[in-house]
Structure formats: structure tokens, C-alpha cells
Amino acid sequence: MSGHSTYQPKSGAMKWLERRLPIASLVHSSFVAYPTPRNLNYWWTFGGILSFMLGVQIVTGVVLAMHYTPHVDLAFKSVEGIMRDVNYGWLLRYLHANGAAMFFLAVYIHIFRGMYYGSYKEPREVLWILGVIIYLLMMATGFMGYVLPWGQMSFWAATVITNLFSAIPLVGDTIVTWLWGGYAVGNPTLNRFYSLHYLLPFVIAGVVVLHVWALHVAGQNNPAGIEPKTDKDTVPFTPYATVKDAFFVACFCVLFAWFVFYIPNYLGHADNYIPANPAQTPAEIVPEWYYLPFYAILRSIPNKLLGVTALFSSILILAFLPWLDTSKVRSARYRPLYRQFFWLFVISAIGLGYLGSKPPEGIYVILSRILTLYYFAYFIIVLPLLGFFEKTKPLPHSIAESVLKEGVPLGASAPSSRAKA
Amino acid sequence: MTTVSSADHTRRDFLYVATGAVGAVGAAAVLVPLISQMNPDASTIAAGAPIQVDLSPIADGQIIKVFWRSKPVFIFHRTKHDIELAQKVDVNSLPDPVPDSERVQKGHEQWLVVIGICTHLGCIPLPHQGEFDGWFCPCHGSQYDSAGRIRKGPAPKNLYLPPYKFVSDTKIQIG
Amino acid sequence: MTRTLSALIVAAALAVPTVAAAQEQQMTPPRQNWSFSGPFGTYDQAQLQRGFKIYKEVCSNCHSMELLSFRNLAEPGGPGFTEAQVKALAAEYKIQDLDDKGQPTERPGRPADHFPSPFPNAAAAAAANGVAPPDMSTLAKARTYTRGFPWFIFDIFTQYQEQGPDYIVAILNGYKNPPKDFSLPAGGHYNEYFPGHNIAMPQPLQDGQVTFDDGAPNSLHEEAKDVAAFLMWASEPHLVQRKRIGFQVMIFLIVLSGLLYFTKKKVWKAVELHPEKLEQKA
């Protein structure tokens, strides 16, 4: 996928294969010789972590599917059967449930990293949009997976989320009935969600291949936000990036294992250990934490259609980011103003997440509205205007130079120091 | 690349080998739950507990089918004629030579208890059919006699005997 | 940015009264000491056996526990009954089955059987009790209370996962006479810790109600703790194994991370200019 194809097959068998299917040289050029900027910090390991988590989810998911029964009368029982009777079933299920949360945690860090360093800018627009598509697919997959245990939260999340589509004028109700396959969420809904929940991860894997392809065509962005000019600016992917990724994947696994083994139900919701009861809505309906910011945006707007529109816009607007940001400078390191607005954006996203978990009343609604306003203003007003008004700092001439200089003055503000926190 | 001393080299090599080895141990440990989960789960094992069967309603010459561990088990109340036929055969001429006395329990010769799965490829043979006063497997034509022994056809072995014991003269426990 | 931040802090401070008001409705259940809390937690076998006795003599009259089987009582990490005890116990129960002729019949229970439910179905349970008593199989994980900010963040580090049993103990101890200004609907019972205070279940346990074979104290509080511990085990039967394996995994991952860290340092050392060194300092 990249220019540096220096692979020379050594054995006869590899030469034979190379002439027929050059897979070894493809792997070599993409994951061995592939030049990666030498100044990447640990925030860049989250791509590797995400690939790892996708693998974990697919493996544990395929295994869980061997024991799960997608039927309204049996889904809850079969999940409990996994927890109680299947050999290591509890481990596999907790890995899968908490793995989803870790997957989202990693993807959020990955997205914020891309935003901080301007990784979406020319020539990486397609790379970025593919990322947004992966994120959307992840949200759909995560949601449908949450429905499968058929607990109270599963059932009512399915009801509430599918009802979002009823906001569409004229055809809304028809679409919702079509999604359900009935007059309410029921067995057909569960079955199709199961089918799609199994399918979508492989679609994600496919888009990930495109994402990596686009990445290897454009090359990685880096903390300096300037393109590598000479070989001095890069190091080969293997062993440099590989071992660095491996180290941080292992660190990430410590966090993952902490949740799986010690607080496996921390991120879940107690109500989902009550079997689904279509006759009774739980006192509080809250989505999984990774959807909370969008849930807060939805609830901050009192009009149904506008709320749903805002919800979907808040995600889709990410796809337009490469064109909304008018600045020529990529990295926030050289954009003092942008940096402040960026961190405010992070705070507002986290704040929306907190507000999404709170009842929609009093001060929470007001705060949600303020943060929702900032969320959209960041994309529609701040980013387009900043490009014209911001006085950026001078860029280094090369990555190698930035690396040498950085250690003293700029390093203090580089997020690499926070990577281990 | 900077040059490194040979002492540095061995230390580095050791580090690489150690890291690789620990990683490999981890990968192997991950395989344990992934493989183990496909074995029968605790409820399946518990459901495979021994069962008791009352023999008193089984008429002379009747064959009944019960299930133990999801497998059919034939219980054959053999008539005198059936027993004689089974005992008369020249054991050495059989494909799987076992005398009738080893197919039943002493003092309970009228009761034959066999797992009802053809030893060829797992079909259930039909009772009271075939040329040997026993079973005939419709799948590939294996024929068993009144002691459940293979007499003709592609099956290599006699019908297997489940573990069972007589709780009383009219009651057995299978498993 | 500082200004905006302080604005946010002010806003958060404004939010506090609302939170306090919301919490007044449901009193926070007091934290109990549990043998199964923390990274090395295990179940106390004697406590689980006592809890089971309470379940059997009291709870099971109205509550089902349909996901559990008798055999579970003998499985490792649980109350530690012997196989023979479980067999004898199971035989005390009558299990609905079909006879050889397909007619409904009752037979003595076997270890593989599930605990029989006191009512044939949810509708019958509701008809007899006003509200269907919830199934107890996952009850300890299905009950919780709001932790609020910032405690929910501390819980990640302190591994507090015992909200369910704490809540159950609080409910069992929470029956009081209603305050004068509280109008209790007919058929309701006043409970300090129940959201809304109006609970359908009459006080199920009294001081000294269940006598334990091991002579353990049987005040209401002790009984409540024992049955809550038992319900936690019923919800999470593999907790002990989970925490034990978890510790091994943690040790392994920390060793692996350490080795990878040094490997990474070695590998990067070979690069001219030592850029990574500078990154590390940053």
C-alpha cells in the first residue's frame, strides 16, 4: 500500500507464492517497511488498540453466539446460562460487554486525537470520513448488542431508539413498524437485531481495511502536523511502531481486565438484570455511557423532530469536519486559540455525557442546552472562523527538527506526558 | 543504526526472548477458555446423571427405548428362544467376537441393555428386524443379533453397553 | 478558557441542591462489610448456608429463583453443601413432570432440577400478592441505588460493586411506621429505603425468626446480611473464581507490560537522534 516495497522473497516457496499472490510483500510493505513518522506519541497507539479490541469483540462474540438463543422467552435465560453453566461463560460475556465499552473509550480517544492534531485535513479527508462511518457502524452494533440479553434496559432501549425514527414526517410510523416487524418491539425485532449484530462487525472490519488503506496512501499525520520530507523523519513500522503499539495494548489490557474481573457490572445498568417486561417501563431509562452525550443533545431540545435531527446531526457533522476547519495548520501545537476551543469541546462532550445520565429536569436541561449549543457552535462557527483570525505559531521545518527542539519548550504542552495517566 | 557491543547484544536478545515467551504464554492461556467453552456445560453434565428404569412393564420379547445422556438405550426383554440363539453362535465366527455372557449380567440373562446407536455411523437401528433376531440399521444395512452383536454389514463393533446395574430384580440404574 | 471553566464550576455548584433534593427521596443504604468485596473477596460458606436457610424458610414462600438448580449449592465457590446433602435436599421438593403415559405427575427433585417456583406463573403470583414478587436469581445485581458524583468515579478504584446486597439489607431493615404526613395507599407498607417508600411486600423477616444450625446470631440485621450474601452468590455464582483469575491476569499483564516497555526502549534506542527519549521526558 505504500511506496517502500523492499521485500525480497528468500525461500523458494515464498518466491513461488510471490509470483502468484504477492501477499507477503503486501504485508511487508504495509506493516513492516511502512514508514511511520518518528515523532508519534502514545495517542497514536489507539489505532492499534482499536484493531485489537475489534478482534476481541469478534472472537468473544462468535463464541457467545454458540450459546445464545435469540428468542424473547429464552434470550435472558440463555445469557444467564452463559453466566452460570457454560465453561468460562462468565468470562466471555464480561469480556464482550466490557469490551464494547473499552472499544468506545478507545475510539473516543482516537477521534479526539485526530481532532487535536488535525488528522482530518487534506489529504486525509477520505480517511477521516471512513473513520466516521466505522464509528456509526459501531454505534449501531453496540446498540443492537445491548438489546440481545433482553433485560428491561434492552427492551426499553430498543423501544426508545427505534421510536426515534417515528419523528420522520409522513413515513415515520411506517418505518418504525418495519424496523420492529410487528406492532411493538418483540421477537422479530430481537431476531433481526441478532442477525445484524453478527453481521455488522464484519462490515466494520471491511471498512477498517479501507481506513488502513487510506491511511497508508496518505501516510500518518503526526504531532507536528507536517509531512515527512526525508527518511530522517520516519522509522519503519516494524519494529518501532509495532513494539510501541504492543506495549500500549498491554497497558490498555490492564484497564480492560480491571473492569472485567473486578467491576464487571460497573458500566452496565442494574435494570438489565431484570427480564424484559413490555408492561412496565423502568423508572429511569439511560443508554450505555458511550451514547450519553448524544442522548443529552436529544433531550435538550423540546421538539421531537428537531431533537432527533440534532441527535443525528451531532454525529454526521463530524464527516464535514475537514471542510469546516479552514485553518491551514494541522496540529493544535501551533494553534494556541484552537487548542483552547478544542479542550472546551472535550469538556462539553464529557459534560453532555454526565448530563445524559441525569433526569431531564431543572438545571440539567439548561446545562444540556448550553453545552449542546457549544457542541454545534464549535463546528459551525468556531472552526470556520478560527482559520481566518487565529495567529498560528511558526511550524518546524521538518519532523526531525521538531523532535529535537520539542524536548525543551514545546514538550511541556504535548499530550504525550498524559498518555500514561 | 548505531553499533552495539556484544554484551549489549545478549542482554537485548534475552529481553526479546523473555518478552516473546511471556506473550506466547498469555496467548496460550487465552485459548483455554475459548476451547473449554465448547465442552458440555454444567447443566448438560448435571442432566446426564444416572436414570432408573422400571423393568416390570416390559413384556417377554419386547424392546423399549429410553434416553440417557441424549442417547437412545434399548432394553430388550429376551425370550428363552432369543437367549438360546445368542448363546448358540460360534463366537469365533463373529466380526466382533464376544460371548453372550459378556453382553448381559449374570442372573439377569433375559435383560439386554445396549446403546441404540449403530457403531457404523450413528443411526438408530430398527428393533425386531433383519436376519438375526435383533436389529437392522436402515442407513447402511448393518444387522445385529439378539445380543446386540454385529453380524452383517459395515458396522465394525457390537452395539455398546451403557454402564448400568440392577437396583432390584425389576429395576435398573443406567449411568 | 479559565473564565468558561469557572462558569461551569458555578453552574455545577448550582446543580448541587437539585441533587440533594433528589436524594432525600431515597435514603442511601448504609455500607455493610462483605467478605466478597474487594480484589480478594470470597464468599463466606457458613453465611451462604445461613442465607439459604432464610431463603428456604421465608423468601421461597413467595419468591421464585428459577435460574438456580439444586446442584448449584454444591458447586465450588458457593455455599459448599456436599453432593449428598444436595441430593437429600432436592428430594424434599416436589417437581412437576410427565409420567410414561404423558400425564402430569409429581416426582421428588433431583440435583439437576431448578428450584420450583411458588406460583405457576407471573399472573398467578400477582393475583396472590397484589404485585408479582420478583424472581430472586439475579436480584442482587438487579437492585442498586444512585451513587452520584463524585462517588461513582471513586467506585472504579475502590471496586465497590455491592450496591445490590447493601440495598437488600437496607430494605429488610427499613420497615418503619409511616410519618404522620405520609399517606400510605391500601396494601402498601412503609419502607425508609424503598424508592417512594411504598413497598408491596410486608416486612418479611423479624428479629430471631430463623434459627441457624451453627448457632450464629439471628438478629434482624444479621439475618438480612446473611440472606443478602446468599442472594449475591445466587446472582454471581462465579465471583470467587472471577476474582482469583483476575489477580493472576493482573500480575501477568503487569509483567508483560513491563517487559514490553523495556523492549520498546531498547528498540527505540537504536534510532539515531533518540527522539523517543525526548518524547518520554515531555
Image (cartoon, coloured by chain):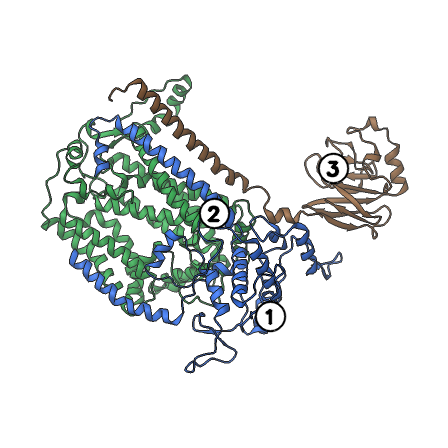
Q: Which mark is residue C243?
A: 2
Q: Chain of mark 1?
A: C
Q: Earlier in the sequence, mark 2 or mark 1?
A: 1
Amino acid identity at mark 2: Lys
Q: Secondary structure at mark 2?
A: helix
Chain rendered green: A
Where is residue A154 shown, x and y percent of the image?
45, 58
What whole-number distance in Å separates the C-alpha atoms at marks 2 and 3?
44 Å
Where is residue A270 shown, x and y percent of the image?
45, 59
Chain C drawn in what color?
Answer: blue
The 10 Å Cα crowd at callout 1, few under 14, some 14 to 19, many 20 or more, is: some
Amino acid identity at mark 1: Ala
The 10 Å Cα crowd at callout 2, few under 14, some 14 to 19, many 20 or more, is: many
Identify the residue position indicated by label 3 in the image: B160
Identify the residue position indicated by label 1 in the image: C124
User: From where the camera sits, is residue A365 visible?
Assistant: no
Amino acid identity at mark 3: Tyr
Residue A121 vertical placement versus A175 (above, below): above
- Quarter holding the N terminus of chain C is bottom left
Q: Is C121 in front, or is C11?
A: C11
Q: Nearer the viewer, mark 2 or mark 1?
A: 2
What whole-number distance in Å separates the C-alpha atoms at marks 3 and 1?
48 Å
Which residue sits at x=55%, y=56%?
A: C234
Quadrant in the picture for residue B88: top right
The reply to whether label 2 and label 3 mark residues of one chain is no
In this picture, residue C163 sits left or right of residue A240? right
Where is residue C67 shown, x and y percent of the image?
57, 57
Chain B drawn in what color?
Answer: brown
Q: Secondary structure at mark 1?
A: helix
Q: Chain of mark 2?
A: C
CB contact under 8 Å: marks 2 and 1: no
Quadrant in the picture for residue B132: top right
